Amino acid sequence: MAAVQVTDAIWLVGSGTHPGVRTDPHDCHCYLIWDGTGGVLVDTGTGLGAEAWLATVAEVCDPGALTGAIVTHYHADHAGGAGAARAAGLPILASAETAAALASADETRTSLAVARAAGIYPADYRLSPTPVDRIIGAGDTVAAGGLSVEIVAAPGHCDGHLVGLVRTAGRHVLFSGDCLFAGGRVSLQAIHDCRLDAYARTVVDLAGRQVDALLPGHGDLVLDGAAADLDRAAESFRRLVPPPNVLTG
Ligand SMILES: [Zn+2]
């Protein structure tokens, strides 16, 4: 398996669906930002494909040169691999909400119990308790070699969700986790902390920022013209109508 280069400084290093880098069917898209001197990972997958994922990272760079792994939110397909990443020496960076849930592998807060009951994860899948090394939040920046990832709070899909913005090769790239997807779709689930009002504020805020490329946690990557995707979602929310849900097709 080989890392899939997305831009000059960004690779897809894990995924549940991308044929080039399919680490485990349950994994989200996992990204590596690497400028040749340093970098950072964005999201860690479930952990079920951790060996393949970490090997793919090592094809591109020395993992020891990375700042760590940013976990966008505590859902298991994004956060479950944090333990494996940490065991490999990578510090974990996440919001306070994500840190609290991961510290105790809280299956209620992360909705893992209901997701597993719904058949989204294997019956024997569990999170392992994982400490977060650095709490990050709105306005923080995370160094990635000579690049810098701006952290933006993005609640709505779930509590404590963060997204990251990085400028590379003249483009503003948004790592959107499960907040926004190609076509301006969103991810709405019947879980305790999916909040439509917060989601609307988040999306309208993001649409007000300059974004050229959208690298979401699932599905198609948008490498150019992503402002149109963000505008579409924001316009829908401004009319008080939830945008199309990525989970329903
Ligand atoms: Zn999620």
Image (cartoon, rainbow, N blue to C red):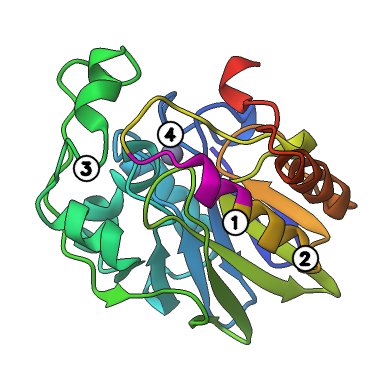
Cα gap from disc 4 to disc 3, whole angstroms:
19 Å
Closer to the chain start, of discs 3 and 2, is 3
> Which residue, given by chain and number where applicable, does mark 4 sit on?
27
> Which residue, given by chain and number where applicable, does mark 2 sit on?
208
Closer to the chain start, of discs 3 and 1, is 3
Mark 4 nearby-residue class (10 Å; few <14, some 14–19, many ≥20): many
Residue type at mark 2: give it.
Answer: Gly
Task: Find the magenta span and give its range.
Answer: 193-200
> Where in the figure is residue 176, as x and y percent of width and height?
60, 52
In which quadrant of the rendered image does the C terminus lie?
A: top right
Ligand 1 neighbours mark 1 (CB distance < 8 Å): no
| Residue 4 appears in the picture as rendered | no
Query: Which residue sits at x=64%, y=76%?
Result: 35
Query: Which residue sits at x=16%, y=64%?
Result: 131
- The disc at residue 202 is 1
Closer to the chain start, of discs 1 and 4, is 4
Cα gap from disc 3 to disc 2, whole angstroms:
30 Å
